[in-house]
């Protein structure tokens, strides 16, 4: 049986929560989204070894600045986006297809 990190489970739950909230509240005109700013330099991550961590990441630049990371939230807020969708800064703020792996 496969073991999943608590971070992966948290991401899955965040995506599912937004999708379900969007479904339940659609009739009320409420939209919900999940979005991921990517690996970002913040006070919470300042002690991490970015050189080692970013060597294994496909996002560029790595890490993002806080201003670069917030762009995905602004994109969803200012553009027509599918309610319930999952959006990623690392994918150029495009909607990310969500699937189950395991």
Image (cartoon, rainbow, N blue to C red):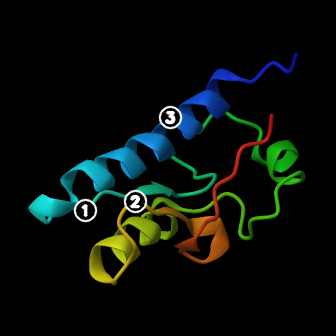
Residue at position x 75%, y 24% from top? Answer: 4
Quadrant of residue 34 in the image? bottom left
Callouts 2 and 1 close, C-beta under 8 Å:
yes
Residue at position x 83%, y 49% from top? Answer: 51
Badge 1 or badge 3: first in the primary sequence: 3
Badge 2 or badge 1: first in the primary sequence: 1
Whether residue 62 appears in this view of the structure is yes
Quarter in which the N terminus is drawn: top right
Whether residue 44 appears in this view of the structure is no
Regarding mark 2 in the picture, which secondary structure is present there?
loop
Question: Are there few (<14), some (14-19), or many (20+) residues within 10 Å of tag 1?
Answer: some
Badge 3 or badge 2: first in the primary sequence: 3
Q: Which residue is mark 1?
A: 31
Q: Which residue is mark 3?
A: 13
Quadrant of residue 45 in the image? top right
Q: Nearer the viewer, residue 95 or 78?
A: 95
Please give left or right for residue 52 compared with residue 86 in the image. right
- Residue 42's spot in the image, x, y percent? 50, 46
Up-down: is 92 above or below 42?
Answer: below
Q: Which residue is mark 2?
A: 84
Up-down: is 15 above or below 5?
Answer: below
Up-down: is 79 above or below 54?
Answer: below
Farthest left residue? 28
Quadrant of residue 84 in the image? bottom left
- Residue 5's spot in the image, x, y percent? 72, 23
């Amino acid at each position: 049986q496969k073991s999943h990190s608590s971070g992966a489970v948290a991401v899955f739950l965040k995506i599912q929560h937004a999708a379900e909230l969007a479904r339940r509240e659609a009739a009320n005109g409420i939209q919900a989204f999940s979005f991921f700013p990517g690996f970002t330099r913040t006070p919470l991550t300042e002690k991490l070894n970015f050189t080692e961590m970013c060597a294994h990441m496909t996002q560029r630049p790595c890490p993002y600045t806080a201003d670069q990371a917030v762009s995905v939230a602004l994109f969803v807020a200012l553009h027509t986006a599918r309610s319930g969708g999952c959006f990623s800064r690392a994918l150029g703020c495009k909607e990310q297809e969500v699937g189950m792996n395991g």
